[in-house]
Image (spheres, grey):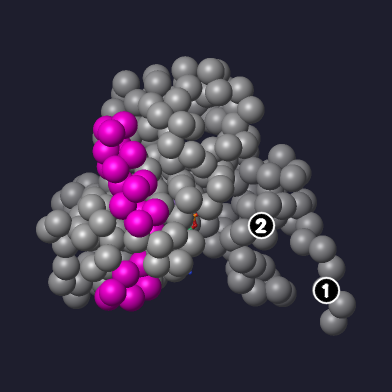
Amino acid sequence: MATTELDARELARAIAAHQLQVHVQPQIDLASGAVVAVEGLCRWTHPTRGPVPPAEFVALAEATGVIHDLGLFALRECCRIGREWRERGYDLAVAVNVSPLQLETDRFFDELERQLADSGLAPADLIVEVTEAERIADYSAVTGRLDIIQKWGVTVSIDDFGSGHSSIERALAVHAQELKLDRSLIAGADWEAVADAVAQAKTGGMRVVAEGIETADQLAAVRSAGCDRGQGYFIARPTDPDRFADWLQTFVG
Ligand code: G
Ligand code: MN
């Protein structure tokens, strides 16, 4: 079968028809081992192609404007999941990935306000992960809007730090409270760079999440480098939220 280009219209239809799913991957507090948050990650299983890698459909969505609907779908699902889990008594925040293209629209911030209200999720239970922050074109406008949601209690996190897509300066410029270290830093075992990032983040009052932890050694290394939280396959792979409760019961931090 000839492989054809992924079609943005198909992606848009799949979003509208609820054919995408948000999976969740836990983050633990490295000092206590407790699960403190989950990151929501979109998954798309195409009817004939099977699972489409997120990097592919996110890039397609960004290139075609579908990112706004994709991002709102993710936001809505994350708010719903976070609220449901609060009701069940889990003490967990939910992190949602947001594209710079979304941050440049009023629509995203209007929807954020609406989704918090509709779902009943406490703003303090929501983390907004700004991906590829270096692509934000109008910093002062985005900073102003992020300041407002941070006043409500939402946490702003700068994703992919160390990948070349973000910098401490950018993180400080948008008054972020969290820095997420890119998995390339962890995979590269660059513990000096990790410790350096931790030192800079702490100076700016930010907490640090290490992602892409795949081994016990990496977990120990990010802990001793001073990271606050950890995420990665060694702790858990992203899973269907319906299966997360089972995982949580078996997890010993
Ligand atoms: O850009 P962001 O950091 O949000 O990307 C998260 C992606 O990384 C998800 O697609 C998720 O499945 C993947 N991921 C999560 N943990 C690991 C890990 O430990 N190793 C690798 N290679 N990928 C991971
Ligand atoms: Mn992320």
Magenta segment range? 192-218
Few, some or many residues within 10 Å of mark 1 (<14, 14–19, 20+): few
Q: Of the residues shown, which amino acid type is indicated by label 2?
A: Phe
Left or right, 206 with reference to 96 = left
Between residue 65 and residue 47, name the one nearer to us: 65
Which residue has dot 2 on it?
Answer: 57
Which residue has dot 1 on it?
Answer: 3
Q: Residue furthest right?
A: 2
Q: Is residue 108 above or below residue 249?
A: above
Residue 165: quadrant of the picture: top right
N-terminal of the two: label 2 or label 1?
Answer: 1
Q: Does the magenta segment cover residue 197?
A: yes
Please give the name of the residue rendered at 72% of the width and 52% of the height, measured from the top-left corner. 60
Label 1: which secondary element:
loop
Q: Does the magenta segment cover residue 116?
A: no
Please give the name of the residue rendered at 34% of the width and 48% of the height, measured from the top-left corner. 196
Q: Of the residues shown, which amino acid type is indicated by label 1?
A: Thr
Relative image position of residue 108 (x, y in whole percent): 54, 30
**Is the CB of the residue bearing disc 2 within 8 angstroms of ligand 1?**
no
